[in-house]
Image (tube, rainbow, N blue to C red):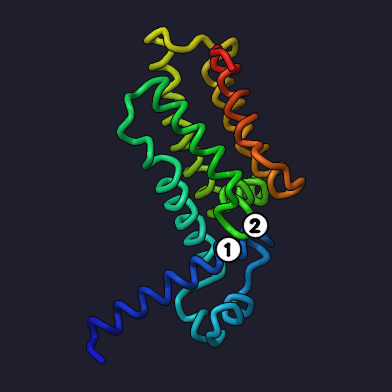
Amino acid sequence: MSPRRSRAEAASTHEAIVREAAEGASEIGLEGISIASIAASLGMSKAGVAGHFKSKQDLQLEVIEFGAREFAENVWAPNADLAPGLERLLGCLDTWYTYSAGGPFRGGCLMTSATTEFDGRPGPVREAIAATWGRWTRILRADLETAIENGEASPPLTPADTITAVESLATGVNQQTQLYGRKDPEKTASAAARVLLGLSA
């Protein structure tokens, strides 16, 4: 086996481990995942899984990074080329709500789950989650401010409060889907977002 092939296979195995950890974390939380459960799911030895990470925290941080990439690819990427302002803002919100309702991981939206789990736990994992959401919030806020400047939106709340409200709708969509099994909650969220932006529902 060539060194190049060995590296490629190791990278593929590493990605499979992180993906399975992300799936598990969406169901039982980042604290709930274990080397043993991941190894059992993938048919690997515990040593084979553990050898990819220095610590459980390193695994958790990689799961957050993985979740952030998945989120960006599914929510931001489809709208990245839209015009800044209302068009891109609505596109991002609609895609986000649809993503949350679609159960992107076995337990729903990984990033929503992780945010709820770690919002009161100081440390590197919480900081990574906060940094990820902070970048997303700034993107939405910039498009909202552009929309206001262009006369495209007239929210009754301040821009900061408006973004807080429309972001909270995504959490609600995840809960309505995962906890209550409600159908199409993303449609309600999209309509509510338009009211918050000062548009007709």
Q: Position of residue 133 (x, y in %)?
A: 51, 40
- Mark 2 sits on what residue? 107
Which residue shows up at 45% across the image and 76% down it? Answer: 52
Depth order, front residue of 198/57: 198
Q: Above or below — where is 13 with respect to 98?
A: below
Does residue 54 appear to the left or right of 177 in the view shown?
A: left
Which residue shows up at 49% across the image and 54% down it? Answer: 67
Estimate the spatial distance between the alpha carbons at disc 2 and disc 1, rounded to whole Å. Answer: 7 Å
Does residue 93 appear to the left or right of 26 in the view shown?
A: left
Q: Quadrant of the C terminus?
A: top right
Q: Position of residue 54 (x, y in %)?
A: 48, 73
Which residue shows up at 22% across the image and 88% down it? Answer: 2
Q: Position of residue 107 (x, y in %)?
A: 65, 57
What amino acid does circle 1 point to? Glu
Q: Position of residue 98 (x, y in %)?
A: 55, 40
- Report if the CB atoms under discs 2 and 1 are less than 8 Å apart: yes
